[in-house]
């Protein structure tokens, strides 16, 4: 049985490097144009070149999202952009629009085409149709059950099947939601979703303006559309057996720490599965340490139950906070230098997340500021702080601690 590809989001170059360092087989990125996710930084030509080189040097792949629902004017400059992707040796493009698909087949017939989840592919016939069109991979809609996926992979062999295993869910079919467009003018199909589904809603009878009636039992209103995040780490065996060839992690606007943590947890879980080991609950515990909305298995095991949504709040669960990133380590003095992000104190118990290894735990027994003064608290984000650490930790490792409520 072939190991599935672990595919991670990379909103910018730092996230791309974090995803690869922490174990992703491939990343997906967006250029400055033609890609959803307006909120992420996205990649200029030079950053894309650097990112693709970084990945290829390590035997990893880079796919470029080109998944807008295109209007006529979107074809202006498209040929030049595709030429650029070919020249940069992108490993594939993620496409939602049939016109763009045809355009790529015409002008870059060797460029691999992945059909985006924005195309809402939910059945074998559509997968087969895209295969005949020349697509090498289809990213299935998130609304399919494991049984449906299994049937698709059986009926349409010889095409890669990618499924989301982790991250935010849309309450509507991805690519078919106009809630944000209607309520804010921000187009979710152009990557600018305002996440209107997460807002707090009441019911109002038209003759009683201003009287907000609760829709659910909670008298503060309800977040009726607010789905929990998908998390399939406990079920990777079933996904593999169903024929899924790529495990996709959602979140190009998420932080590099988030990407590194999720990638590492799935990397470890996939590798353990192929070593014949039983599922280790520690991998799920890792995923609970990052900011999330609670977890669900979405549609994989049938229609989501009512508890797959969060009705009481739209805020994230944050059990741990990132307090800094390692900038250097002195092997002789065994002192680590960290660029601070959030406040921490002498005496804090911290964890350092390392690429390719288990995290380490230590207590900060003493620490110093940039001028060498001993300090009890590190209060200034972006300042450098040093403290003793017996274990050698590479630059870029993430430092976290339990978040105090
Ligand atoms: S409003 Fe919600 S359901 Fe609609 S596209 Fe945005 S995130 Fe998805």
Image (cartoon, grey):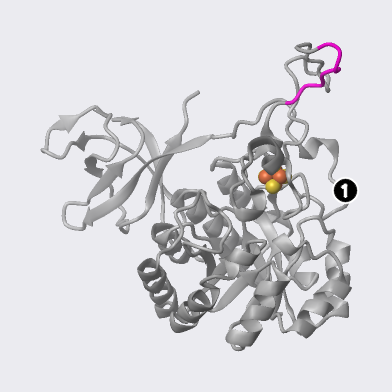
Q: Nearer the viewer, residue 3 or 49?
A: 49
State which quarter of the image contains the N terminus: bottom right
Q: What residue appears at the point 57 percent right and 53 percent down from the top-left corner?
A: 251
Image check: 200 left or right of 83? right
Q: Main secondary structure of the magenta part?
A: loop
**Residue 66 lies in quadrant:** bottom right
**Measured along the vertical axis of the image, is residue 157 above or below residue 151?**
below
Give the magenta range: 201-208
Give coordinates of residue 109: x percent, y percent.
62, 88
Give coordinates of residue 273: x percent, y percent.
66, 67
Q: What residue appears at the point 65 percent right and 47 percent down from the top-left corner?
A: 168
**Measured along the vertical axis of the image, is residue 2 above or below residue 347?**
below
**Measured along the vertical axis of the image, is residue 33 above or below residue 166?**
below
Q: Nearer the viewer, residue 135 or 13?
A: 135
- Per the image, label 1 sits on a secondary structure element best described as loop
Give coordinates of residue 403: x percent, y percent.
47, 31
Residue carrying label 1:
303
The answer to whether residue 274 of the structure is visible from this angle is yes
Image check: 365 left or right of 45? left
Q: Nearer the viewer, residue 6 or 106?
A: 106
Q: What residue appears at the point 44 percent right and 83 percent down from the top-left corner?
A: 87
Within 10 angstroms of label 1, few (less than 14), some, or many (20 or more) residues? few
Q: What residue appears at the point 36 percent right and 32 percent down from the top-left corner?
A: 348
- Ligand 1's quadrant is top right
**Measured along the vertical axis of the image, is residue 115 above or below residue 59?**
above
Image check: 191 left or right of 157? left
Classify mark 1 as within 8 Å of ligand 1 or not, answering yes or no. Answer: no
Give coordinates of residue 281: x percent, y percent.
64, 50
């Amino acid at each position: 049985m072939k190991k599935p590809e672990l595919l991670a989001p990379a909103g910018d170059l730092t996230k791309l490097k974090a995803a690869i360092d922490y174990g992703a087989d491939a990343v997906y990125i967006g250029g400055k144009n033609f890609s959803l996710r307006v909120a992420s930084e996205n990649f200029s030509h030079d950053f894309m070149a650097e990112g693709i080189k970084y990945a290829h040097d390590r035997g990893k792949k880079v796919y470029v999202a080109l998944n807008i629902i295109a209007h006529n004017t979107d074809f202006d400059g498209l040929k030049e952009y595709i030429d650029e992707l070919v020249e940069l040796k992108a490993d594939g493009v993620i496409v939602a629009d049939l016109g763009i698909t045809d355009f790529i087949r015409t002008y870059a017939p060797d460029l691999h085409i992945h059909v985006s989840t924005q195309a809402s592919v939910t059945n074998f016939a559509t997968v087969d149709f895209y295969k005949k069109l020349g697509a090498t991979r289809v990213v299935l809609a998130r609304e399919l059950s494991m049984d449906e996926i299994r049937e698709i992979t059986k009926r349409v062999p010889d095409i890669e099947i990618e499924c989301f295993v982790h991250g935010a869910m849309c309450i509507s079919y991805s690519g078919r939601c106009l809630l944000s467009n209607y309520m804010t003018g921000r187009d979710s199909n152009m990557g600018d979703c305002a996440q209107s589904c997460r807002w707090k809603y009441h019911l109002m009878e038209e003759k009683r303006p201003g009287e907000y009636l609760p829709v659910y039992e909670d008298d503060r209103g309800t977040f009726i559309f607010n789905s929990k995040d998908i998390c399939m780490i406990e079920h990777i065996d079933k996904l593999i057996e169903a024929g899924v060839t790529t495990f996709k992690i959602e979140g190009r606007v998420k932080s590099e720490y988030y990407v590194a943590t999720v990638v590492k947890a799935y990397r470890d879980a996939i590798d353990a599965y192929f070593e014949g080991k039983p599922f280790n609950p520690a991998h799920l515990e890792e995923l609970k340490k990052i900011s999330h909305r609670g977890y669900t298995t979405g549609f994989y095991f049938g229609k989501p139950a009512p508890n797959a949504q969060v009705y009481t709040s739209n805020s994230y669960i944050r059990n741990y906070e990132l307090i800094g990133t390692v900038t250097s380590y002195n092997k002789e003095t065994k002192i680590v230098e960290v660029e601070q992000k959030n406040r921490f104190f002498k005496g804090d118990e911290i964890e350092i997340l390392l690429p390719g290894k288990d995290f380490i735990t230590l207590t900060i027994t003493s620490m110093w500021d940039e001028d060498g003064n001993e300090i009890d608290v590190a209060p200034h984000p972006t300042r450098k702080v040093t403290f003793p650490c017996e274990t050698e930790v590479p630059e870029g490792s993430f430092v976290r601690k339990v978040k105090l409520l």
